[in-house]
Amino acid sequence: MIDWLRIVPYLLCMFVSGWSVWNYQASRYELRIANMEKDYAKSATKVAQENLDAFTKLQKTKDAAIKSAESRAAANRRAAVDATVAADGLRDELAKERARLATSTCESVTKYATTLNTVLDQCQAEYRAVAEKADGHAADAKTLTEAWPTLP
């Protein structure tokens, strides 16, 4: 028969050493996994910060482009007002000239001045319309160009 009293300490020693090795390996793997999770968290944080920095840069570029567009629009409005004032002054001068020529004895001079005034009024209206469209187009194009996202 087997002497169990002599075998039990050996079995117990084998069991304890196996359990110790198992726990040691488990601790090593848990440490390795924790380090991998820490590295992943650092990497994810770094990428999130880079994305936030890129977003902030794009946002500032867009805001600057909008501010620039607003200032160009205000300048265009001022230029349009100045053009209207100049056109009104020219119209008044031409009206005075027409009145002066109307008292003239030469009928052909009067017709010439009237025709000239009409033509200039039509030209001025067309030039203003074209200028407004061109200013709007230029402002839109510049806004899109300035706001277009660029990444380093």
Image: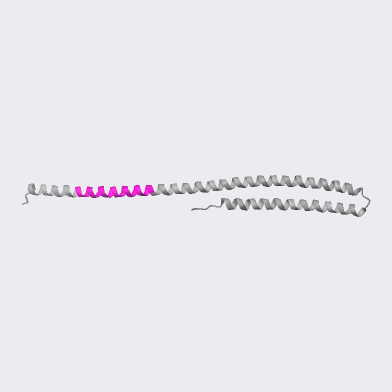
Look at the image and name its color scheme: one colour
Q: Position of residue 42 (x, y in %)?
A: 38, 47
- The residue under the point 29% across, 50% down is 32
Give the side of residue 109 with respect to residue 58, left or right. Answer: right
Q: Nearer the viewer, residue 62 or 9?
A: 62
Give the side of residue 115 with respect to residue 42, left or right. Answer: right
Q: Position of residue 116 (x, y in %)?
A: 84, 53
Q: Nearer the viewer, residue 38 or 121?
A: 121
- Secondary structure mostly seen in the magenta stretch: helix
Give the side of residue 152 with respect to residue 78, left or right. Answer: left
- The residue under the point 77% across, 47% down is 87
* Residue farthest toward the right in the current orientation of the protein: 105
- The residue under the point 58% across, 51% down is 146
Q: Position of residue 108 (x, y in %)?
A: 91, 55
Q: Position of residue 113 (x, y in %)?
A: 86, 52
The magenta stretch spans which residues?
Answer: 20-42
Residue 25 is a magenta residue:
yes
